[in-house]
Image (cartoon, rainbow, N blue to C red):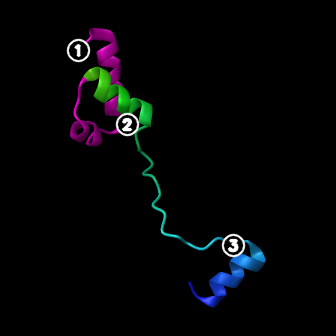
Amino acid sequence: MDGATFWACVQNQVKPDRGVPELPSEALPADLVFMLISRVGLDETTVAEMSKDEAIARLQKYWIDGT
């Protein structure tokens, strides 16, 4: 961190960039991932490759058909 960044933080409460990654806009909610793995029986790799719409559709299929 350089001096200008430090003082901007101290004097103006401007938080420095700490390199925290942003979540993708299509990140799956944790409870959805948990249900797909624990109830539906999918593996983590399969779930990770799904879009949010695909994951929701797959869980709905499980609730309707039981498969």
Q: CA distance from mark 2 to mark 3?
A: 34 Å
Which sits earlier in the primary sequence, circle 1 or circle 3? 3
How crowded pointer 3 is (Cα within 10 Å; few <14, some 14-19, many 20+) is rated as few
Disc 2 is placed on an element classified as helix
Which sits earlier in the primary sequence, circle 2 or circle 3? 3
Which residue is at a point 37% across and 36% down the rendered structure image? 52
Choose top left, top right, bottom left or bottom right for residue 10. Answer: bottom right
Which residue is at a point 64% across and 89% down the rendered structure image? 3
Mark in front: 2 vs 1: 1
Looking at the rendered structure, the kind of residue marked 1 is Thr
Choose top left, top right, bottom left or bottom right for residue 40. Answer: top left
> Is 50 in front, or is 34?
34
Range of magenta residues:
41-67
x, y percent for residue 67: 23, 14
Q: Which numbered marker is on residue 52?
A: 2
Q: CA distance from mark 1 to mark 3?
A: 51 Å
Q: Would you say the residues marked 2 and 1 are in contact, meaning their CB atoms lie under 8 Å apart?
A: no
Which sits earlier in the primary sequence, circle 2 or circle 1? 2
Regarding residue 30, the answer to whether it shows in the image is yes
Q: On the image, numbered disc 3 is attached to which residue? A: 14
Looking at the rendered structure, the kind of residue marked 3 is Val
Q: Which numbered marker is on residue 67?
A: 1
Which residue is at a point 36% across and 26% down the rendered structure image? 35
> Is 2 in front, or is 62?
2
